[in-house]
Image (spheres, rainbow, N blue to C red):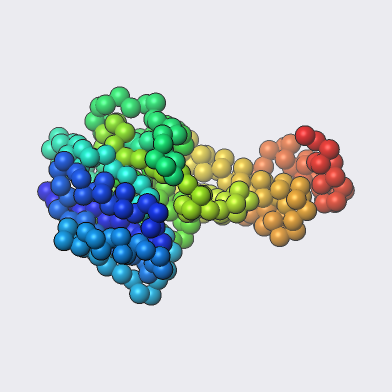
Amino acid sequence: MTFSIVIPTYNGADFVEQALLSALNQSRPADEIVISDDNSSDDTLAICQKYTDRIKIYRNLQGPSGFVNGWNHAIEKASGEYISILHQDDLLASTFLEEVEKALVVYPDVKHLFVPCNYIDGDGNSLQEPDYCTGEIKRYTGIEYVRAYQTIGHPHIHRCPGVVTRRDIFKVCQYRKEAGHIADDDFFYRVGQYTDVVGILRPLASYRLHSKSETGHLKNIQLIQRLAHDDIFQVKQWRENSFMQKEEYDYFVYWAKCNAFREFFLGIKLNDNTLLRQGKKDIEALRSLNIELSMIKKIFMLCHSVLGTRVISKVLSWIK
């Protein structure tokens, strides 16, 4: 079996060398390491070019094309049987590929594997370690994997660093731009329709939280807006799909309702008409799917329709 580690990059000079070195220093060496750059304007490529004797570098001169397209471009460049995406700011433990290969010897028919990750800050300091790692190699059916992803961990049983997928899966299940900010989650929810999944329950990757990341650079309101849109997309796509069971579908409904109402509420509190209108639009989109808010939230919206934004905003300012 052969392994490709692909690193999609865009203006990642702060951390890309650390990510690259973690890929290069595997106890079971990768068969290839691919840098797929989305037309960076900083020193990202100069840093990567120090290692040209050990890696392949591709540059998308039409970029930047967005983070999801960046992932797919990187996957297209890989030639290995198994592909692992490593974000430019994340890390792999030195034994990551060695442990994955051992798991594939036990479960050769499985086409998607993951390991949990630690959370680290910009300086590499530990912020959070997974408290559910038993050390076992566990096989999940597709729906068991979805359930584990939704309910285990903080917030999920794994993140994108430390995931390995057999290349033929990408012919039927790709990362989708329309899934938005949670395109990685969206891929993980769908992949179980095509294969069982193996989890190596040891923290063999590190996910970095910092202000320049795709999530970190967003303001809280922007993130809520993105998530409201993306959660509604998930509700729509799974609404009549027999793969997703009620409990797992209700997870999407819950978060769609939460984030849509948060838009509406913050629009009033901040006297932001754009945010208020978007919240109303998203709540109406849920109603068109026969999904209603709780009675308390309905009453709040009724009060707003009667009293208006100015009055409700003033009342909210009194509440600490």
Q: Residue at x 74, y 36 (%)?
A: 296
- Image coordinates of residue 4 in percent, x first then y, are 20, 54
Above or below 134: residue 91: below
Above or below 153: residue 217: below
Observer-nearest of 19 and 230: 19
- Direction from residue 68 to residue 203 in the image, left or right: left
Q: Residue at x 13, y 38 (%)?
A: 105
- Image coordinates of residue 284 in percent, x first then y, are 67, 54
- Direction from residue 76 to residue 243 in the image, left or right: right
- The answer to whether residue 15 is seen in the rendering is yes
Q: Quadrant of the C terminus?
A: top right
Question: Where is residue 229, by image quadrant?
Answer: bottom right
- Image coordinates of residue 212 in percent, x first then y, are 48, 53
- The answer to whether residue 85 is seen in the rendering is no
Q: Residue at x 30, y 24 (%)?
A: 134
Residue at the bottom extreme of this rendering: 62
- Image coordinates of residue 25 in percent, x first then y, are 20, 45
Please tell me how many numbered marks the rendered image carries: 0
Q: Residue at x 33, y 59 (%)?
A: 8
